[in-house]
Image: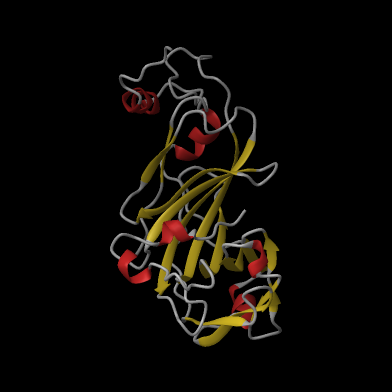
Amino acid sequence: MKRQFAASAVVLPALACLLAPEASAQVEFWDVIKIAEYTQDSADTQPAMPDGYAAEVVVEITDPGDISAAEVSSAKSPRMLMGDGLEWTGEEEFATQADLDMVWPGSMMYAISITAGALAPSSQGFTIPVDNYPAGAPYLTGASFGYLSGVDPALPIVITWNSPASTSSFAVFVDIFRESNGERVFAEDFIDDQSTGTTIPGGTLIAGEAYVLEIGHTNVQFLMPDPTGFNSEGVVAFENITSVAFVAGGPSGSCEGDADGSGLVDFGDITSVLNNWLQSCGP
């Protein structure tokens, strides 16, 4: 259920004129991400250590026939990419950062190669910088952790998170996946790194269903189209991702005054009322 950058989301207004792909671009978009994975299992608590690490490579194309085989080089043997329609991906999990860096060390040149298909042969070179993960793990703050399983999912759910510990973090993202099939039901990408909250619209979640929320801080290096490579925009990134597993709550109302469905009448109920002030509940 890892997330990758989408071509439409990556181009920020200030960079659009520099990164807009040319008509001759062979690949729509590509990215390479080194990830530190964390888990939050209690309220308002920052995970201290990663559970593991991962590397992800994504190549997006415009026609399924463009690629029928592709690989990415590494410090070990080449890693094969797997195709799924218009997206070819490679994901690899590692127990430690040292294990990851043995395969994907920094300050080394790599290449994504298309070896079969309409675009073959072609390749895109890139360099992974020295490790530049954001400082500290992201985590849900305040009562957000409990709201996910305590609030009636028919109501909007306000969640908050910690601000990145340094200015090196380029952006924040929040995704929610349905655990049963991996479907992404909520996505908010490239949130300004000074922002520390968002609202999950009412009706996004289904009461009683299991979900995984992922919140991430990311450092991004944007790469301009390279005419000698794929001639399309790309990204090399370092991300800290924290996962929160939860089961969406049931309808509220079992406790008079419990507006947020947490099972408790507290200041969270005042916040819920103010967040939904003047909303119409009728037809």
How far from the left and from the top, in percent, is residue 146? 51, 35
Q: Residue at x 54, y 60 (%)?
A: 4
x 64%, y 33%: residue: 209
Q: In the picture, which quadrant includes the C terminus?
A: top left
- Look at the image and tell me whether residue 155 can be seen: yes
Residue 216 vertical position relative to residue 33 in the rendered view, above or below: above
Task: Give the residue displayed 34% in from the left and 24% down from the top.
Answer: 270
Quarter residue 181 falls in = top right
Could you say where residue 278 lies in the image, as x and y percent from the top left? 30, 19
Asked if 146 appears above or below 259 in the picture, the reply is below
Q: Is residue 271 left or right of residue 64?
A: left
Q: Describe residue 90's horizontal placement relative to residue 244 as left or right.
A: right
- Residue 90 visible to the viewer: no
Position in image of residue 11 (x %, y %): 38, 62
Residue 227 in picture, x, y percent from top left: 45, 82
**Towards the viewer: 98 or 222:** 222
Q: How many marks?
A: 0
In this rendered view, identify the residue nearer to me: 204 or 42.
204
Which image quadrant is residue 22 in?
bottom left
What's the colour scheme?
Answer: secondary structure
Query: Relative to 93, is 130 on the left or the right?
Result: left
Identify the residue at image location x=64%, y=29%.
208
Which quadrant of the structure image shows residue 101? bottom right
Q: Residue furthest left?
A: 14
